[in-house]
Amino acid sequence: MGGNLAEKNQCDLRSAITFTLGLIFGTFAILTSKLLYEMHAIGSDGTYKPYEKPVTTVLVMFSAMFFALPIYWVQQLFTNPSAREKVDPKVLFKLIVPSTFDMLGTALSQAGLLYTTASMFQLLRGSVIIATAVLKIIVLQQRLTNYMWIGVGVNVLAMVFVGATGFLETGAAVGSNPKLGIILILASCVVQGGQYIYEEQIMSQDKCVPLVVIGMEGFWGLITTTLIAVPIAYIIPGTDCGSFENVYDSWVMWRNDGNIRLMVFCFFVSITVYNVMTVYITLFLSSVWHAILDNFRPISIWGLDLFIFYCLTAGKYGEAWSQYSFFQFFGMLLLFLGTAIYNGSCFKSQEDYSLLEGSKKSPGLTKSPLLLNNILDKVEQEYLRSLDDQKGDVEMKPRLSSM
């Protein structure tokens, strides 16, 4: 028991670094995709038009994820043959499941966005942490402590404040069909939570390497998107050369504009690093931490927009501070508080230590670095107390024998 706990305690620093890198590159991934949709170029029909290519963006995303496999192969080449990590070929086919979850979750969330406002979308997406926590209990049989649930609740409350800003600034717009939009977005949160849980399970139980997990998800995603999403987008009538989206037209726009090529490359790099970091977050900490990272990104994007507006472009780009920005700022503080609570930095009780024995059945409980330190301190105290008791017994035996 002590050896397992000590091994997981080493995740403290690297987990923090991984989370920070995931937040940075996740923020840049969203910003680059947003900038892409604002760019214009000449398409295959000879017209100058905006680059609005969601299906092509998904293809680039899965290609970036697939790039994790070459990174893994190069890593193995420089690893001692006796220390190389082996992956069961059967596990590679299991990774079709999270890849399908990823594509389905993205499709549901984007469809929901069509029927609701952006603020409502952002607000409802915060519920992915609840879906992940509940699925963690049902699927992985790993229950959370009371303070972890408090942390989850505070994180959700933070997203309420962030989403409320959008409602106030847009005059409480609700979208064309808010009920359908809400159902689709909540369904996407459940599907996304299922993806996070499945990734955690396949790494913890099947011992699959994180780079292989993300790379194979990209591989299967490329296949399913190319064979299913691309043809459907071409068949459905629309304004993109007569289709909902024409992928060939996307390629022509790439060739005709260097700025689009540069931004696609930046998106590719950002999404590669972000997805690698998220799967390592799931490995080092848990799937719930992956959901916490998702909730952090809207706040980090808002902060970066403020920085761009006031410090870099003198108000030309970015976002200005409005009368309702205090709600976002308060939501940011709540998000920090909720994460600290979930990590065990605020509430500690004797009951939490009693979970030490239960952590054998629920290894996820030991993946909170501060809780782990608290548990180790408790173990050390119990160990020293047992040594004192043994010493007392040894001293007592000679006295009894002399009697």
Image: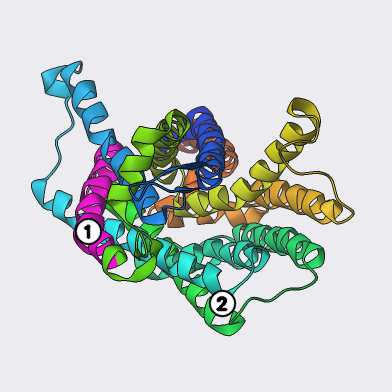
Disc 1 on helix, strand or loop? helix
Residue 122 sits above or below residue 34 on the image: below
Residue 339 falls inside the magenta stretch: no
The N terminus, quarter of image:
top left
Judge from the rendering whether residue 231 lies leftward or rightward of residue 345; answer left or right: left
Residue 231 sits above or below residue 221 on the image: below
What is the number of the mark on residue 182?
Answer: 2
In this orientation, which residue lies closer to the viewer: 281 or 143? 281
The residue carrying mark 1 is: 224
Disc 2 on helix, strand or loop? helix
Q: Which residues are magenta?
A: 204-232
Q: Position of residue 204 (x, y in %)?
A: 30, 48
Can residue 141 be seen? no
The residue under the point 32% across, 71% down is 236
Secondary structure predominantly adopted by residues drawn in magenta: helix
The residue under the point 39% across, 68% down is 238
When asked about the image quadrant of residue 93, the answer is bottom left
Q: Residues within 10 Å of mark 1 (few under 14, many from 20)?
A: some
Which residue sits furthest right?
323
Q: How many marks?
A: 2
Amino acid residing under circle 2: Ile
When asked about the image quadrant of residue 232, the answer is bottom left
Q: Position of residue 107 (x, y in %)?
A: 40, 65
Residue 222 falls inside the magenta stretch: yes
- In terms of sequence position, does the residue under pointer 2 or pointer 1 come before the other? 2
